[in-house]
Image (tube, rainbow, N blue to C red):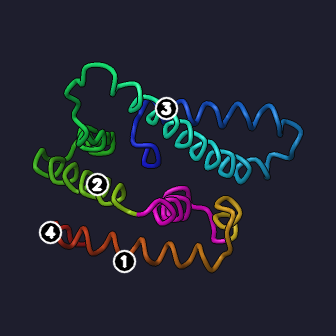
């Protein structure tokens, strides 16, 4: 969702990646599958953006011949997401609202990170991969993973601090 910024496209990308994994690597040991899936998922995301670029080029070229319809280019699906949390069922409404605002601020800050920093951050801290697994999934060195993660953490801290979110 953070990579493609469209829920429907994200579901399609994950489904394509799962299909590629099962078709190409069904015989691999189960321990190797998570890292293979991460790599296939990243390649599928890159393929999605390549296809999107080609489509937008043709759409732009063809739209020059027809009517131009008003479109909202500033639409951000992350702004419309409601925070889902089943663990707060007994919490007070003010606490739930504050947590939802904090989650929205974090999601918005994550969406503003450069792609490689966001990818490294999500793999390391949300997917809980270690540095070596993250490096293998991203196709880079362990030092690059550490650099991307460090920069992402500092950038997120600055963005959240500017919005008044404190630890």
Helix, strand or loop for disc 4: loop
Q: CA distance from mark 4 to mark 2?
A: 14 Å
Residue pointed to by mark 1: 154
- Residue 164 badge: 4
Residue pointed to by mark 2: 108
- Residue 117's place in the image compared with 66, above or below, is below
> Residue drawn 69% across and 46% down?
40
Viewer-nearest of discs 4 and 2: 2
Where does the C terminus fall, quadrant-wise?
A: bottom left
Q: CA distance from mark 1 to mark 3?
A: 35 Å
Viewer-nearest of discs 1 and 3: 3
In the image, residue 53 lies at what x, y percent?
49, 40
- Residue 43's place in the image compared with 67, above or below, is below
Do tag 4 and tag 2 residues touch (Cβ < 8 Å)?
Answer: no
In the image, which residues are magenta?
114-131
**Main SS of residues in magenta:** helix
Q: CA distance from mark 1 to mark 2?
A: 15 Å
Mark with earlier residue (3, 4): 3
């Amino acid at each position: 969702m953070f990579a493609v910024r469209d829920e429907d496209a994200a579901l399609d990308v994950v489904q394509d990646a799962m299909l590629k994994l099962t078709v190409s690597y069904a015989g691999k040991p189960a321990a190797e599958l998570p890292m293979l899936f991460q790599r296939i998922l990243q390649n599928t995301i890159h393929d999605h953006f390549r296809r999107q670029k080609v489509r937008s080029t043709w759409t732009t070229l063809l739209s020059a011949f027809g009517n131009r319809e008003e479109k909202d280019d500033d639409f951000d699906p992350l702004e419309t997401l409601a925070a889902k949390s089943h663990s707060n069922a007994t919490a007070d409404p003010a606490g739930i609202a504050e947590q939802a605002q904090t989650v929205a601020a974090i999601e918005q800050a994550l969406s503003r990170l450069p792609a490689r920093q966001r990818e490294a951050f999500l793999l390391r801290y949300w997917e809980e991969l270690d540095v070596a697994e993250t490096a293998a999934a991203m196709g880079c060195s362990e030092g690059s993973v550490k650099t991307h993660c460090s920069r992402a953490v500092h950038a997120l801290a600055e963005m959240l601090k500017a919005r008044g979110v404190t630890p």
